[in-house]
Amino acid sequence: MDLIKNVPNEDAKPNNQKQIIIWWEKKRLYYNLIMLTTGVPLLILALTKIKAALSPSDTSLIIIYGVFANILYSSGSVLEILIFKNIKSMKITRIGQLLLITGTVISVLINFYAFSQLCIF
């Protein structure tokens, strides 16, 4: 029973920067899976509609897009750390959850927008 009591609550308010980074890194795989499961079907749909195949330059753009999405994902932990360091009196237990959900929704919307533009041209 003592072992269970000593396990930190993952959703509890973080005590330090390291806990914030660890929390975000544990969520990165889920973010990438969401991006993949929305991006791949949209890409297939767009390519089918415009009757085109991926060129090597298209493939490299997709890889760059994925890297850039992960850089933006990392900005979530940086923003949370800045909030943690500068606004200690916040009543929100996990501002990271709000940032993660908001950022993921925006990323998925960007996926829809980017691939809708493929279908226009």
Image: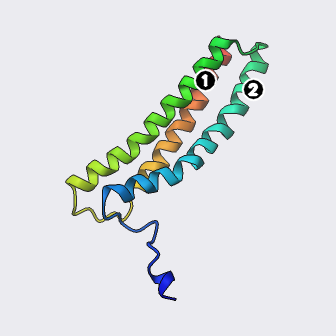
In the foreground, 108 or 96: 96
Circle 2 residues within 10 Å: few <14, some 14–19, many ≥20:
some
Q: Circles 2 and 1: CB distance less than 8 Å?
A: no
Regarding mark 1 in the picture, which secondary structure is present there?
Answer: helix
Between tags 2 and 1, which lies in front?
1
Amino acid type of the residue tagged 2 in the rendering: Leu
In the displayed orientation, state which residue is furthest to the front: 3
In the foreground, 66 or 43: 66
Q: x%, y% of residue 94? A: 39, 61
Residue identified by numbered label 1: 62
Q: Which badge, 2 or 1, is on the more N-terminal residue? A: 2
Regarding mark 2 in the picture, which secondary structure is present there?
Answer: helix
Q: x%, y% of residue 43? A: 70, 26
Count of marks placed on residues: 2
Residue at x-position 40% and y-position 45%: 76
Q: Check the picture and name the quadrant holding the C terminus.
A: top right
Residue at x-position 38% and y-position 56%: 20
Q: Which mark is residue 5?
A: none
Instruction: Tell me if residue 14 comes above or below residue 52 in the rendering.
Output: below
Instruction: Tell me if residue 48 comes above or below residue 74 in the rendering.
Output: above
Is residue 95 visible to the viewer in this orientation of the structure? no
Q: Quadrant of residue 19?
A: bottom left
Q: x%, y% of residue 25? A: 48, 50
Instruction: Tell me if residue 52 comes above or below residue 73 in the rendering.
Output: above
Residue identified by numbered label 2: 45
Amino acid type of the residue tagged 1 in the rendering: Ile
Residue at x-position 61% and y-position 23%: 62
Instruction: Tell me if residue 18 comes above or below residue 91 in the rendering.
Output: above
Query: Mark 2 to mark 1: distance in Å?
Result: 15 Å
Q: x%, y% of residue 45? A: 75, 26
Is residue 56 visible to the viewer in this orientation of the structure? yes
